[in-house]
Image (cartoon, helix red, strand yellow):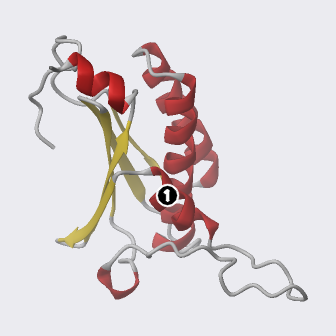
Amino acid sequence: MPDDGVMPNGADIPPGPAFDETFPSDFRWVRRIVQNAVNTLADLGLSTEDLGSFEIVLAEALNNVVEHAYPAASPGKVRLLIKRRPGALMIEIRDRGKPMPQGRAPLGNHPMTEFHQHDAMPEGGYGWYLIREIVRDLVYDRRDDENFLVIRLGIGDPILDAKSSV
């Protein structure tokens, strides 16, 4: 994630991450980290709508790491880095847990596509669907036994941002 750039209104983007925390892979920590990150970004002037989208994406992604990457008997560490970019937030999640199945992030198909009227409601499957519906880009990689999930979340009004950069 490059550290250069200018906001659409001409203001400089501060270099470095807006948020950088390493924490235990535990659901209680996820709640705490998500709230801390939302508070930090609220202080940077993000809209309520952008903060809501950010909170959904971050909570779903981090809960997936805790639930699937680390066995309950041997939790590990998770690192979260967030950088503000023109019209976007770059969210990077790193962990040393198990790799994602087939070495890629799930496609996030809507879990109700195979639902029939008399079937029970499906359990799970909504998280990746929500993430992929909300974000602009998502990249997963694994290097040297470390998982990297990088998400680009659009923020601001793209129409206003485009007009102000002209």
- Viewed as shown, does residue 86 lie left or right of 44? left
Residue 37 visible at all? yes
Residue beneath the point at 47% across and 31% down: 37
Residue beneath the point at 49% across and 57% down: 133
In the rendered structure, which amino acid carries the disc numbered 1?
Answer: Glu
- Viewed as shown, does residue 101 lie left or right of 15? right
Report x, y in % for residue 159.
34, 29
- Viewed as shown, does residue 153 lie left or right of 115? left
Dividing the picture into quadrants, the one containing residue 29 is top right
> In the figure, 56 relative to 82: above or below?
below
Say which of 56 and 39 sits in front.
56
Say which of 101 and 23 sits in front.
101
Say which of 100 and 134 sits in front.
134
Q: Image quadrant for the C terminus?
A: top left
Q: Which residue is mark 1?
A: 133
Say which of 158 and 83 sits in front.
158
Report x, y in % for residue 67.
57, 68
